[in-house]
Image (cartoon, rainbow, N blue to C red):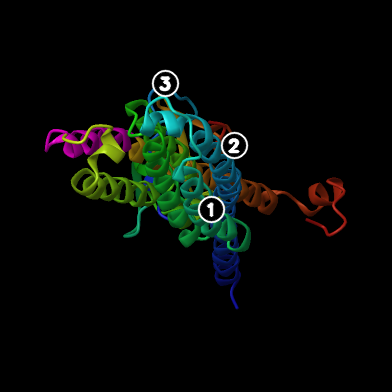
């Protein structure tokens, strides 16, 4: 399933999270905006969530994945 | 097999299962909409058939022959041609619900119904509103190519009848040459927004399915990180 569908989930005014840090393919980590994260293939997002390797942030503060996924 | 390797394989298997379920949910949602809309149109087609017969028996003689009420040939047109237009889409709605061919046949038939009703009312301009209502109903499918099928059918009908029998479609024998283009332009204006709406609806359905997958993945992570004691306390007979 493609992930271009997620444009309106990250619409302005919606809370939950605004930045995600995930493992980078070449090693290390990469920081993504919510829109960029939601633009990743579903398979990739799901694997980060299962492994717990995605760290979510709201206004610079870390939040739990379950809080991030509330909206 | 190392623990890390086994954990990776478990993650891959869980990911595949969750993604597959999301795709299944999305497809099931689409099918539900297609099937429900097929049934709605089956009812509408039969309703239009009865309405056309009523129009042919009451309004059509006045529309086409002045104030003298006669048993008009349009009664037979409504009965036979209307039956022909109705039969295939209604049959497909019950025999092949949810299939693409059903949606496209319904779209074509719905536009043919617009054409027939316009003819039966003597090219009455207000009956052309049926075209726009029909396009809005076709948007219920949330499948924009269906709107293109409807547009091609109604544009072709207007073009051909506009040339061969203008009174049937515009109510006057000598309309301006560009009248068909004017009508087609309004249809294109209408479907431009309906196509956007259909695409947005499809995206929203996809987002819903993907959000479900993300929540499932989160749940899987919570389960993996909980202890055996915690899992047992959850009172799950299978241990998970």
Q: CA distance from mark 3 to mark 2?
A: 19 Å
Chain letter for mark 2: A
Q: Is residue B172 left or right of residue B37?
A: left
Q: Is residue A20 visible?
A: no
| B64 vs B201, nearest the viewer | B64
The reply to whether the magenta stretch includes residue B192 is yes
Of tags 3 and 1, which is closer to the observer?
Answer: 1
Q: Which residues are magenta?
A: B175-193
State which chain disc 1 sits on. B
Q: Single out the residue that lies furthest toward the bottom.
A: B1
Residue B68 to residue B7: above or below: above
Kindly report the secondary structure that dominates the magenta region of the rendered protein: helix
Q: Which residue is mark 3?
A: A13
Q: Are marks 1 and 2 on the same chain?
A: no
Q: In this view of the protein, which residue sits in the foreground, B239 or A53?
A: B239
Closer to the camera, B80 or B215? B80
Residue B120 location, x and y as percent?
41, 38
Q: Which mark is residue A66?
A: 2
Q: Between disc 3 and disc 2, whose residue precedes?
A: 3
């Amino acid at each position: 399933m493609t992930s271009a569908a997620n444009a309106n989930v990250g619409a302005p005014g919606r809370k939950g999270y605004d930045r995600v840090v995930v493992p980078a393919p070449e090693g290390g980590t990469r920081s993504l905006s919510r829109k960029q994260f939601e633009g990743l293939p579903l398979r990739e997002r799901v694997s980060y969530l299962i492994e717990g390797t995605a760290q979510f942030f709201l206004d610079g503060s870390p939040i739990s994945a379950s809080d991030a996924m509330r909206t | 097999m190392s623990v890390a390797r086994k954990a990776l394989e478990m993650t891959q298997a869980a990911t595949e299962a969750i993604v597959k379920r999301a795709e299944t949910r999305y497809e099931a949602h689409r099918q539900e909409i297609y099937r429900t809309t097929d049934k709605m149109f089956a009812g509408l087609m039969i309703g239009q058939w009865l309405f056309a017969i009523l129009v042919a028996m009451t309004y059509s003689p006045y529309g086409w022959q002045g104030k003298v009420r006669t048993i008009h040939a349009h009664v037979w047109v409504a009965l036979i041609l209307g039956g022909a237009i109705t039969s295939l889409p209604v049959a497909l709605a019950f025999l092949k619900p949810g299939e693409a061919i059903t949606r496209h046949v319904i779209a074509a038939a719905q536009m043919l119904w617009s054409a027939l009703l316009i003819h039966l009312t003597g090219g009455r301009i207000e009956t052309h509103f049926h075209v726009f209502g029909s396009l809005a109903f076709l948007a219920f499918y949330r499948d924009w190519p269906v709107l293109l099928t409807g547009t091609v059918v109604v544009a072709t009908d207007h073009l051909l009848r506009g040339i061969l029998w203008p009174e049937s479609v515009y109510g006057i024998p000598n309309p301006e040459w560009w009248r068909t283009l004017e009508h087609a332009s309004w249809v294109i204006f209408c479907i431009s927004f309906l196509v956007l709406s259909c695409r947005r609806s499809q995206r929203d359905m996809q987002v819903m399915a993907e959000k479900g997958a993300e929540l499932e993945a989160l749940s899987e992570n919570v389960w993996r990180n909980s202890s055996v004691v915690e899992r047992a306390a959850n009172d799950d007979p299978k241990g998970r």
